[in-house]
Image (cartoon, rainbow, N blue to C red):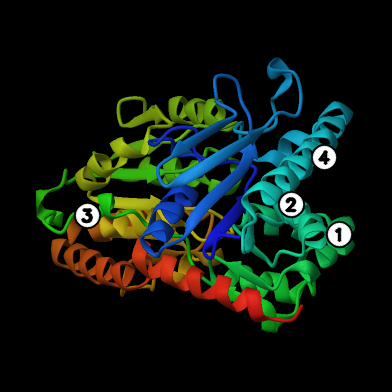
C-alpha cells in the first residue's frame, strides 16, 4: 500500500490538460503531487478518450457504462438534470453508477490507496460509501454546490444522503454557505464538516495588471449558461448602461434564450457570446475586463470570482450563496441583491466611473485570494484532512 496514495472518484474529470470542465480537480491533483501524494482518478469514459491515461500528475481510469454512442450523461452539463428528463436517463444512470462502483473496486484493489476522495455526494459519494465498506478504506466527500442544491430540492434523497455522509470520515465544502445547508438539512453531523475551497491556478495571477490598463467599458462573465446563473439579469443591466460592452464566456441550455433576450433589447453590438473556452484562454479575458460580474443565485462557491480577483479585476456578485466567502461588500468587491438588474447596473457604473474604487477592490480581493485559494494552501489543507480521515472514527 502506497503511503500517500489517493483515489479520487468523480463523475467529471478534465479530458485534456486545458479542459475547463472539472479543471479544479486536476489542479488539486497537481498540487497534491508537490505534497508527495500520488493521485489515481476513476471517472466516466467518453468518445475519443483513452481508458487509462496520465493527465498532469493524475492517472485517470475511465469506465464504460454503455456503447460509446449512448454514453451521454457525463460531460454534458448538470448530470441530475439530464437524468431527470425521462425513464431512459434514469435507467442509464443506474447502469452508470454500477459501472462506476465496479471500476472503483478494481482500481482500489490494484492501487491500494490510503484514502478515497469522492467529489459530489451523488454519484461519487454513493459509490465511495459502498467501496469504503468493501475495501475498508477511509472516505472523504467533497460537495460542490449543484449536488447540495439538488438535495435541497428533492427531499426523497435525504435518507440516501444520510447513509452516504455517514460513511465519510470527513466532509468538506467549498464555502460556509454549503456547510450551513448540509447541517440545516440534518444529513451530516456538523462536527464532520470542514470548509475548504477549491484552488485557483497560479496562471490567473497577474500582479502586473492594473485597472487603468483594462478596457474601460468591458464587462466579463464566465459561467455555464443555466437559469441558476441569472445571466439574463446581467444582460438587462447592460441595457441600462450606455456604451458598456458585455462578454459572455460559457455555454449551456439557456444560451438560445439569452441570445434572444439580447436581440429583444437591441444589444447585439454590445453583447458577445464566445461559448466555452479552454482554461488557457481565460487569463487574457480576465486581464482585459474593467469589471467581472457573477449574478448567480445560491452559487456554491463561485471559483471564477477568485480567478478574476487573482487576475487583478474588480468583481461584482449577487449577495447569495457561497460567493460571500470571496466577495466582502465594499472590501473585496461589491454585492447586490439577486435578480435585481437595476441594482446591478448601479454597481457596474459605480466601478466603471471610479477607478480608485476599482483599484482598491481589485487589490484587496487579490490579496484575499492569494491568502486562501492558492494551490499550495488548499493542497496542504486537504493533505491534513486525509491524515485526519485515516485516524478518525465514523
Say which residue label 2 marks. Answer: 122
Q: Is residue 335 above or below residue 266?
A: below
Q: Which mark is residue 98?
A: 4
Asked whether residue 57 is in view, the answer is yes
298 relative to 237 in the view: left or right: right
Disc 2, disc 4: CB below 8 Å?
Answer: no
Find residue 341 and report its horizontal and vertical position in percent.
46, 51
Specify few, some or many for label 2: CA neighbours under 10 Å numbering under 14, 14-19, or 20 or more. many
Q: CA distance from mark 3 to mark 4?
A: 52 Å
Specify few, some or many for label 4: CA neighbours under 10 Å numbering under 14, 14-19, or 20 or more. some
Q: CA distance from mark 3 to mark 2?
A: 42 Å
Q: Earlier in the sequence, mark 3 or mark 2?
A: 2
Pair 3/1: label in front: 1
**Local secondary structure at mark 1:** helix
Q: Earlier in the sequence, mark 3 or mark 4?
A: 4
Q: Is residue 200 above or below residue 79?
A: below
Q: Which mark is residue 220?
A: none
Q: Earlier in the sequence, mark 4 or mark 1?
A: 4
Quadrant (top left/top right/bottom left/bottom right) for the C terminus: bottom right
**Local secondary structure at mark 3:** helix
The residue at 57%/33% (across/down) is: 254
Disc 2, disc 1: CB below 8 Å?
Answer: yes
Specify few, some or many for label 3: CA neighbours under 10 Å numbering under 14, 14-19, or 20 or more. many
Find residue 351 and report its horizontal and vertical position in percent.
25, 59
Q: Earlier in the sequence, mark 2 or mark 1?
A: 2
Say which residue label 1 marks. Answer: 160
Specify few, some or many for label 1: CA neighbours under 10 Å numbering under 14, 14-19, or 20 or more. some
Q: Earlier in the sequence, mark 3 or mark 1?
A: 1
Q: Is residue 27 above or below residue 370?
A: above
The residue at 68%/78% (across/down) is: 192
Q: CA distance from mark 3 to mark 1?
A: 48 Å
Disc 3, disc 2: CB below 8 Å?
Answer: no
Amino acid at each position: 500500500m502506497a503511503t500517500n496514495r489517493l483515489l479520487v472518484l468523480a463523475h467529471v474529470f478534465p479530458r485534456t490538460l486545458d479542459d475547463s470542465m472539472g479543471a479544479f480537480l486536476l489542479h488539486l491533483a497537481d498540487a497534491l503531487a508537490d505534497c508527495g501524494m500520488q493521485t489515481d482518478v476513476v471517472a466516466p469514459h467518453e468518445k475519443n478518450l483513452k481508458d487509462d491515461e496520465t493527465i498532469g500528475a493524475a492517472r485517470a481510469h475511465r469506465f464504460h457504462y454503455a456503447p460509446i454512442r449512448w454514453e451521454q450523461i457525463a460531460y454534458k452539463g448538470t448530470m441530475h438534470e439530464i437524468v431527470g428528463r425521462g425513464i431512459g436517463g434514469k435507467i442509464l444512470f443506474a447502469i452508470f453508477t454500477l459501472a462506476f462502483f465496479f471500476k472503483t473496486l478494481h482500481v482500489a484493489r490494484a492501487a491500494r490507496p490510503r484514502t478515497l476522495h469522492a467529489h459530489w455526494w451523488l454519484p461519487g459519494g454513493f459509490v465511495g460509501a459502498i467501496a469504503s465498506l468493501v475495501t475498508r478504506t477511509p472516505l472523504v466527500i467533497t460537495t460542490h454546490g449543484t449536488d447540495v442544491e439538488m438535495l435541497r430540492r428533492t427531499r426523497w434523497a435525504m435518507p440516501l444522503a444520510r447513509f452516504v455522509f455517514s460513511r465519510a470520515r470527513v466532509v468538506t465544502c467549498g464555502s460556509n454557505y454549503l456547510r450551513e445547508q448540509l447541517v440545516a438539512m440534518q444529513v451530516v453531523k456538523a462536527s464532520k464538516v470542514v470548509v475548504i475551497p477549491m484552488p485557483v491556478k497560479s496562471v490567473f495571477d497577474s500582479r502586473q495588471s492594473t485597472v487603468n490598463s483594462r478596457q474601460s467599458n468591458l464587462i466579463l462573465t464566465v459561467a455555464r449558461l443555466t437559469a441558476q446563473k441569472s445571466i439574463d439579469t446581467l444582460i438587462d443591466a447592460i441595457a441600462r448602461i450606455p456604451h458598456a460592452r458585455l462578454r459572455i464566456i460559457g455555454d449551456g441550455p439557456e444560451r438560445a434564450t439569452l441570445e434572444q433576450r439580447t436581440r429583444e433589447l437591441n444589444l447585439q453590438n454590445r453583447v458577445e457570446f464566445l461559448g466555452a473556452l479552454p482554461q488557457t484562454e481565460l487569463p487574457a479575458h480576465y486581464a482585459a475586463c474593467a469589471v467581472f460580474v457573477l449574478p448567480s443565485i445560491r452559487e456554491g462557491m463561485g471559483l471564477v470570482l477568485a480567478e478574476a480577483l487573482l487576475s487583478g479585476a474588480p468583481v461584482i456578485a449577487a449577495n447569495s450563496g457561497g460567493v460571500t466567502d470571496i466577495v466582502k461588500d465594499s472590501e473585496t468587491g461589491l454585492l447586490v441583491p439577486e435578480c435585481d438588474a437595476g441594482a446591478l447596473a448601479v454597481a457596474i457604473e459605480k466601478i466603471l466611473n471610479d477607478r480608485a474604487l476599482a483599484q482598491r477592490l481589485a487589490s484587496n480581493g487579490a490579496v484575499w485570494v492569494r491568502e486562501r485559494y492558492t494551490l499550495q494552501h488548499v493542497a496542504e489543507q486537504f493533505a491534513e484532512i486525509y491524515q485526519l480521515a485515516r485516524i478518525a472514527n465514523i
